[in-house]
Image: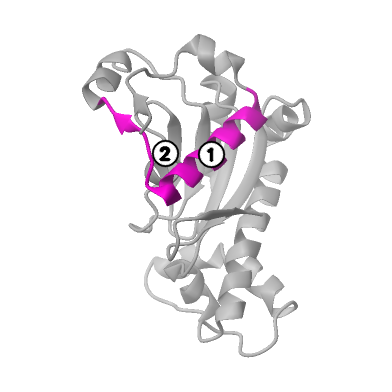
Amino acid sequence: MPHRNKAITKEQQDSLTPMKVLQDFIEGNARFIRDEVHSIDHKALISQTTDGQHPKAIVLSCIDSRVPVELIFDQTIGDVFVARVAGNFENIDILGSMEYSCKVAGSKLIFVLGHESCGAVKAACDHVELGNITALLENIQPAVKLSETQVKGKYNSSNNDFVDKTIENNVRLTIDRIREKSPILNEMEKNGEIKIVGGVYHISSGKVTML
């Protein structure tokens, strides 16, 4: 079993490319599936990151407790920024956090991570209205509407194909809006400084499928 007792340094972060970080995530997920993740010296990493951090990536994930972002990619203290909101969509605060992560703090990858059986997506498919949840689900409606043009059958959460397609569309549309709404991140990606990608985590297997 591999061992981690060294946090990422600025020099190591600078040497990374977006593709290297993505490959690291893919390999980490493979270790997670095989139950061969790193053993971690948390005390050492806490000490090394007390005065600073140099994360390699930022992940936008759902709040779902079954999607422990660092664990499923075999990452640890100091490795990644994580932004979480039910339904893993962007808003102005998350965009600002991404811009900080990449433009200021030097991260190389933005990973938008949806997941199987997402409750927020199911609620959006069913047009649930409840308190502040109503406004939250509006952010997922573009993906719902797109799926209605692509999938046959009922357009609600009883149709697993419809839900699965909406989960994928929500990730893809979120990536599109990140590029559209953040000229900073759009330019960084065009210049090869960062990469913006997406995937879906399967809670039934532990596997992340790239989109």
Q: Nearer the viewer, residue 25 or 30?
A: 30
Q: Nearer the viewer, residue 138 or 126?
A: 126
Spatial CA span between label 1 and label 2 = 8 Å
Using a 10 Å C-alpha cutoff, classify the residue at mark 2 as few (fewer than 14 neighbours), some (14 to 19) or many (20 or more). Answer: many
Image-quadrant location for residue 166:
bottom right
Numbered disc 2: secondary structure = loop
Question: Residue 75's x, y, as percent?
Answer: 41, 35
What colouring style does the render use?
A: one colour
Q: Answer whether residue 114 is visible to the viewer in this image.
A: yes
Q: Is residue 43 left or right of residue 176?
A: left
Number of numbered discs on residues: 2
Q: Is residue 170 magenta?
A: no
**What residue is drawn where x is 43% and y is 53%?**
85
- Find the residue positioned furthest to the front: 1
Q: Is residue 151 left or right of residue 125?
A: right
Residue that numbered label 2 is attached to = 74
Question: Residue 8's x, y, as percent?
Answer: 44, 18
Question: Residue 108's x, y, as percent?
Answer: 60, 28
Q: Amino acid at mark 2?
A: Asp
Cβ atoms under marks 1 and 2 closer than 8 Å:
yes
Q: Is residue 35 left or right of residue 167?
A: left
Question: Residue 33's x, y, as percent?
Answer: 44, 51
- Find the residue positioned furthest to the bottom: 153
Q: Is residue 20 magenta?
A: yes
Residue that numbered label 1 is attached to = 27
Q: Which residues are magenta?
A: 17-41
Q: Is residue 179 above or below residue 143?
A: above
Q: Amino acid at mark 1?
A: Glu
Image-quadrant location for residue 205:
bottom left
Mark 1 and mark 2 lie on one chain; the one further toward the N terminus is: 1
- Find the residue positioned furthest to the top: 11
Q: Is residue 146 left or right of residue 13?
A: right
